[in-house]
Amino acid sequence: MGNRGMEELIPLVNRLQDAFSAIGQSCNLDLPQIAVVGGQSAGKSSVLESFVGRDFLPRGPGIVTRRPLVLQLVNCNTEYAEFLHCKGRKFTDFEEARHEIEVETNRVTGTNKGISSIPINLRIYSPNVLNLTLIDLPGITKVPVGDQPPDIEYQIRDTIMQFIIRENCLILAVTPANTDLANSDALKLAKDVDPQGLRTIGVITKLDLMDDGTDARDILENKILPLRRGYIGVVNRSQKDIEGKKDIKTALTAERKFFLSQPAYRHMAERMGTPYLQKLLNEQLTNHIRETLPVLRNKLQRQLLSLEKEVEEYKDCRPDDPAITTKALLLMVKQFSVDFDKRIEGSGDQVDTLELSGGARINKVFHERFPFELVKMEFDEKELRREISYAIKNIHGIRPGLFTPDMAFETIVKKQIVKLKEPCLKCVDLVIQELIHTVRQCSCKLGRYPKLREETERIVSSYIREREERTKNQMLPDLLSFCSILCVCDSKSAQQRTSQFCRKQAVGNQDSHLPLLRQIVVRKGWLTISNISIIKGGSKEYWFVLTAESLCWFRDEEEKEKKYMLPLDNLKIRDVEKTFMSSKYVFALYNTEQRNVYKDYRVLELACDSQEEVESWKASFLRAGVYPEKSIPENEETGADNLSIDPQLERQVETIRSLVESYMCIINKTIRDLMPKIIMHLMINNTKDFINAELLAKLYSSEDQNTLMEESPEQAQRRDETLRTYNAICEALNIIGDINTNTISVPLPPPVDDSWLHPGCRAPSSCPAPQHWHPIAGHPPGRPFGQGPTSFTPPIGAPPIPSRPGALHNLCISSNADLVRCPPQIPSRPTRVTNVPRRPPPAVPGRPTS
């Protein structure tokens, strides 16, 4: 080829294939290669054996090639074969190589004629070959034979498509000449993935088996189904020749004689045959590699960068080095502590944008879920009055009561405070769930060491459970301690405080700041009104805006077209059970005065996509002053007759009831503020301190260090694969760096212009102008390309030279194989060819002809 750098490109790709095949994967690389595609008995194996000059491929009836065979031909002074799966063993007897292919095929696919896409890598060194890499794919078949799988056609097609669909794969479509080209399975598959024919090279076999009076001249001249890279004709050994052990060199001589002796092929004999096909493929693949090498280098560099971070983590993993193992354990525990702090405090470099997590979920429990649970525990009016009445009577005993007893107030308040324990305990449980969930999220980075992760989760979760018990045990005394304020609250001051509270409620609308507060938006979002009848339009989704005064909804979030405004006065919330057919979660608004809420509807049912969203909306309505309904006991009227109608007792009941309501408002506000602080102090902060200070010691005391730092089999396999892949990519980049890509190559032929081939187009003036090649780098600018003594090519339509057929050998282009198939310029005198070029000098031994 005249360029040493170009000659090394195909061995370069061979080394890349070996580097990645050794680790059992290709790293999703699209390496330049040539895939041989054809139907069964199309002659693929004979073409490959003719390249090598040896019989080394399995033969037999039915499908024989059941695994892709990556065949790497290397020009070398010695001759032997070598398989990648048994590297180091040299096969000088090619019968043994054939047997090894059969054994390796059966090892993966079995003996039931099944196929597999796992390739076999075979490298053949020989002085009779040019550097070339081909992939022999299973032959296309239609009908399963014998014990073949019923879907054998689709299995073979999928296997072939895995290779030829790649943009860097050249397709060698092998078609026998004794079948119609339009029915060629190989060309059909090639057309599916390469509709422009940019990557397809046609090979026509069995030219000697065509019926008398027929030939494939039109096909080989690229008149039928034109391809940018054209067609090459070959003549292989017949089945009789193979059974008779006919020598391949003798077959190549017979092939040469066939093309020179046939009038239909004599004018193109130098561009036909197996030697020319091998040389053409060498040049095409070399040029293709040079074009794709920069893209391949960039892709390898991107993959290397993506693996560097993971490889950096694996550098600290050495099970055989105790010092590195101890360092890795310390780093893992420290990282776990940092991640836990970041998730709780809300800082960190990785912020989840899809859902709440860690401290945000705990904050939601404190400020939405817990207040909502407190409001649900509000006392029932009739039940409270009944309890106060009984308390006053029992305190007075047999004596008539002249004054309101303070003990009744204290008793009722204690009972109400004890009821608050349930939402407080529920708040603790919710926080514990979030803490344990956060621990599991932070321990994901310890997944490389299953035992370490398991022990870390167990130790921290056990500590959280211990803090749970202490927090709950301390909660009831803290709640009851609020009653100590009773000793400083006399009845008169409490009554004054109560009257002031009631007065503020009565004249609240006169507050100058209240209108501004009522205009503050509590929440916005989409809700579905689900109880509108189908006659009136059915369920619809609107954009809702909730303020402290009203609930409005609009057509969309632009809030330009208001559909309705609902005041919040006397509104309550209640749950609605989800029906079997409903996919949404529903809650309802209703008026306590039995008025219509929306038009002629007594209840307005609003629907959300999730129960969590319903709870969030309930909390928003709670902040706006809309409370949930209170359950009415079935025996509500029971004991009503037992209440006294004594006016003095009624005044005492009313006094204590007002005091209890005022006092419980203070208690609720204090608990809302105090409970998050108690939980933060007794649970969350203590858990953080425990992880920072004591977790490592607990881990050392629970298990041996080597046991904790044992990798799982899956993780060890992943680490080995990642390191092998990283090393293979580094080696591949070093291999590519050793090659000088500043070389000369021939560009792809122009699109096929076959108008000059039509019989009616004879005169040069009536034919379209032929397409010319652009000058190639290094070509003398003063001389038109293709007119030198070493590059002259007669037109395909020109008559053959009758007197000296052997001189046709001198008409072959040595390095511009693609140029042969471009539409030639019609000479001024097509009946004569003068200035026959001289014979080129003999080729240098051991190197391909150039």
Image: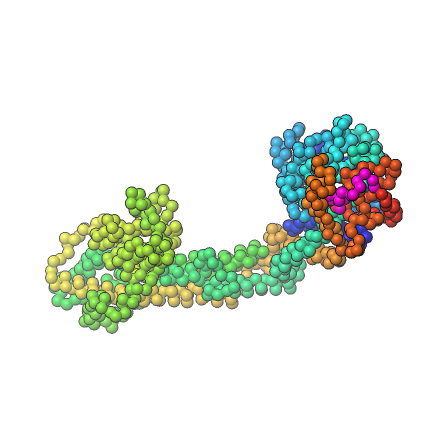
Note whether 84 is above or below 667 in the view shown.
Answer: above
Residue 609 screen position, x and y as percent: 39, 50
On the image, the x and y values in percent for residue 649 come to 14, 62
Q: Main secondary structure of the magenta part?
A: loop
Residues 456 and 511: in front is: 511
**796 within the magenta span:** no
What residue is shown at x 61% (from left), y 55% (from top)?
A: 711
Task: Report the magenta residues as a range.
Answer: 819-833
Judging depth in this view, the residue of 468 and 523 nearest the camera is 523
Name the foreground residue: 31 vs 806.
806
Q: Quadrant of residue 37?
A: top right
The quarter of the picture where residue 321 lies is bottom right
Q: Does the segment drawn in magenta span residue 821?
A: yes
Specify whether residue 266 is in view.
yes
Image colouring: rainbow
Q: Residue at x 29, y 67 (%)?
A: 516
| Coordinates of residue 677 in the picture (x, y in percent) | 38, 67
x, y percentage for residue 104? 72, 40
